[in-house]
Amino acid sequence: MTTSMSIVYDAPATGGSADALGPLPEWRLDHLYEGMDSPRFAADLARAQADAKAFAEVWRGQLATVAAEPDGGARLADAVKGYEALQDLVGRVMSYASLLYASDTSDSLRAKFYGDAQERVTALAGDLLFFELELNRLDDAVLEAAMAAPALAHYRPWLEDIRKEKPHQLSDEIEQLFLEKSVAGAAAWNRLFDETMASLRFDFEGESLTLEPLLGKLQDPDETKREAAANALAATLGQNVRLFTLITNALAKDKEVSDRWRKFADVADSRHLANRVEREVVDALVAAVTEAYPRLSHRYYALKARWFGKEKLAHWDRNAPLPGATPRVHSWEEARDTVLSAYAGFSPRMADIARRFFDEGWIDAPVRPGKAPGAFAHPTTPSAHPYVLVNFLGKTRDVTTLAHELGHGVHQVLAGPNGALMAPTPLTLAETASVFGEMLTFRAMLTGVTDPAERKAMLAGKVEDMLNTVVRQIAFYKFERLVHLERRNGELTPERINGFWMQVQSESLGPAIDLRSGYETFWAYIGHFIHSPFYVYAYAFGDCLVNSLYGVYENAREGFAERYLAMLAAGGSKGYGELLAPFGLDAKDPAFWSIGLSVIAGMIDELEAMG
């Protein structure tokens, strides 16, 4: 199953007191299963294993023969429906295991439960592996004729989608080997990273903090606290950098082996294929953002340095609140009302869907030791409902993060009726709803601000968020390219990886940010480098796309919401080009990216005019 995660890499806001935040909800995973000892969980996992074996006994080696029969289309449709039902069931099982684990990755019992479930699901996936491989071996003309049957034609988008994988498909035996080895390979390294990050403690002014609260200190109004937090982060990451280097080397090599066997030409081509986006489109995005560094990030950070009365800002001041800004603490109830009101102003239906997350226990908000850092929306499976995880600390950025993740959630609910095979959305479009929801909320909040200083602080915060989403994520992508390309020549030392990190960060942030000693290891805590190589450009893709979409919305609001919700409801049944056509947008046009980037530049213009 595809999990759409939107992790907030840059520091969350320093939080208010528990009393100021009010009661924070914890998600109700019993909507899926009652607990680790749930008889329903055990029964569903056993049923999935049995059904997978039965499915293989009926259909393995038979698809070519069945497809050529007079009623081949109808029979193939029955097979696809059975396969889809199994994907839904397995998705429910693994969603529960992974969400329970994300609730407390430091709990050894939860870790074992998750690991055991993953092993058993990987084993049963071996019984199903043949299905898509055999479908892709069908002759194009035979499959096209079979799709004359309406029941199979329903699955045309999925069938055409998986056939894009055909040039990189291996023999059944090798595919089986890759699948079975993944538990002891990439999945094991991913789990080691997660559990290591959860166990790390950072010494901050005599306190022993986990990662999430420590990152929050990087936005403390007190510069000495920001510096202390940055030094604490650097110290602990530095002590563990050899382990993170080993994990990075192992995963990069694992990916290189897979890419070589599957005949991917470029280190990022497998991600582009998964995202259903052409390499030249991503290259154009990267080139446009890189070319815009001077008028975006370089210009903004120089402006911010002047606000602080400095020639340069130390790296721990990059996301600092503006001098004299009064920290604003939002209660959970206020955050809820703000997001739902912004959504309702755009579409009452969108707000109604988002409200269910609050009313029905689909959100986990408190910061807890061991809880997964950042924020994400997990689609689970179409027969259930999504869940949202945030680490709510009460600042304005936490409100917009909540809006972001609920955008994912609304998208996942709307796409659910497409079924387990066609609901998942490529990452390039998965970020569209989230960033759009975030923009709606920010604009609504800004409209209510009359104080010039508060407006300046909000605009600056939004510009920083957009720079983190566009400029910083493209820099992350370029860093990953350097690491994966160099890994082909042998193992990388910590110093080599640190050097790549400093190179791309210096280039992207510009001369007004002073990257001081210790910053060189900050790559080590960024989870997407581990979990989803080259995922990060999807953020920039989504942000620029949404900036263009929002421009269309502001210029012609009549009927926009209906077209927008229809786009979300399509899920993975249509490509990004087809989905953007009703809005008059074409991501293959080189000028497209400039439209999105100009929105950020315009906000910086407004800030410069404020002085």
Image (spheres, rainbow, N blue to C red):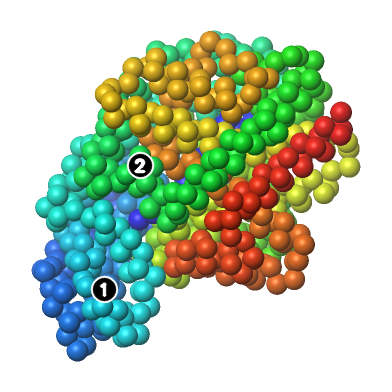
The answer to whether 275 is drawn above or below residue 181 in the figure is: below
User: Callout 2: few (<14), some (14-19), or many (20+) C-alpha neighbours within 10 Å?
Assistant: some
Instruction: Give the quadrant of residue 204.
Output: top right
| Percent of width and height locating residue 382 | 41, 64
The residue lying toward the viewer, choosing from 483 and 85, is 483
Residue at 29% over, 30% down: 488
Helix, strand or loop for disc 2: loop
The answer to whether 547 is drawn above or below residue 16 in the figure is: below
Q: Amino acid at mark 1?
A: Asp
Q: Quadrant of the C terminus?
A: top right
Which residue in the rendered view is the most extreme toward the bottom? 70
In the rendering, which numbered label is found on residue 285? none
Instruction: Give the residue number, with chain letter if any, for mark 1.
Output: 140
Residue at 70% over, 37% down: 463
Helix, strand or loop for disc 1: helix
37 with respect to 9 (left or right): left
Residue at 21% over, 88% down: 71
| 2 and 1 marks in contact (CB < 8 Å) | no
Q: How many marks?
A: 2
The residue lying toward the viewer, choosing from 256 and 29, is 256
Instruction: Give the residue number, with chain letter if any, for mark 2.
Output: 266
Residue 68 visible in the displayed image: yes
